[in-house]
Amino acid sequence: MSLQGKTLFITGGSRGIGLAIALRAARDGANVVIAAKTAEPHPKLAGTIHSAVAEIEAAGGKGLAVQCDIREEQQVIGAVQQAVERFGGIDILVNNASAIQLTGTLATDMKRYDLMNGINARGTYLSGRVVLPQLLASAKAGRNPHILTLSPPLAMEPRWFGPNVAYAIAKYGMSLCTLGWAEEFKREGIAANSLWPRTTIATAAIQMVGGEGMMKQSRTPEIMADAAQVILCKPAREFTGRFCIDDLVLYEAGLRDFSKYAAVPGTTQFLPDFFLPKDVPELPA
């Protein structure tokens, strides 16, 4: 199972889960396009598109940094053009970029609503629409194209919508793209799947939402990266339309010891992530 020679287009991959997926692919010898907004160092957030590419190349891959706001159609079109000019095509789209605010209706103004839905739901759709011609070409060339979206299973449980309906709409919009694309492009041999963590993941977003206490009860982004690698190596015509949970993917691939993913070594109790359906299977003892 390897992504050697494949070209990945990752939105929002300058840090966190997106960067972890990029580095895992780079270790296989993949080409990775980082399409994100942060080109200059941020005072509160580590990582830029340029530092991400430096890490990708140090890990054994080839990288391309493209400053891109996925809410802007022409910027996405330009980013894809640069990717094709550099690497000759795109085999994998990873919809990672996302905005979060866990507030109720009266505390979520329209500016924040538009930001979350513009990046999460609309940005995912726009990125898919622009990249899909390259994925169709990849399918014709027998290169096993995939779309992987970091979004939750489509479980319509009121408990996930009541506290933060604007954010839920935005994240479930991403999952609806997976559902639709899997059906629309299955005959062309393009896989569309979603990946979601069982636990909170130690990223800047979780630091912002829950502080140090939540970070200490989280797993590292590498669990999502390793699960993504398993999914992206599966046959596109056979594995599509799935809403995957990170540790279940890895368990099914043969992993039994998950201790290395603890953000604080030795931690055994982790916080469950948002949007987990009630019927998600537990890992076998």
Image (tube, rainbow, N blue to C red):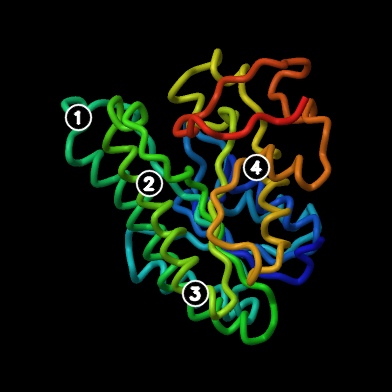
Which amino acid, by three-letter code, is at mark 2? Tyr
Residue 268 horizontal/vertical position (percent)? 72, 16
Q: Is residue 16 above or below residue 285?
A: below
Question: Dot 3, how many residues are within 10 Å of its Cα: few (below 14), some (14-19), or many (20+)?
Answer: some
Task: Report if the CB atoms under discs 4 and 1 are less than 8 Å apart.
Answer: no
Q: What residue would you read off at disc 4?
A: 224
Residue 221 falls in image quadrant:
top right
Q: CA distance from mark 4 to mark 2?
A: 19 Å
Q: CA distance from mark 1 to mark 2?
A: 17 Å
Residue on which the image places disc 1: 105
Residue in the image at 79% along x and 29% along y: 260
- Disc 2 crowd rating (10 Å Cα; few below 14, some 14-19, many 20+) is many
Nearer to us in this view, 65 or 98: 98
Above or below residue 210? Residue 182 is: below
User: What quarter of the picture does the N terminus occupy?
Assistant: bottom right
Question: Which element carries disc 1, helix, strand or loop?
Answer: helix
Amino acid marked by disc 3: Phe
Amino acid type, mark 4:
Met
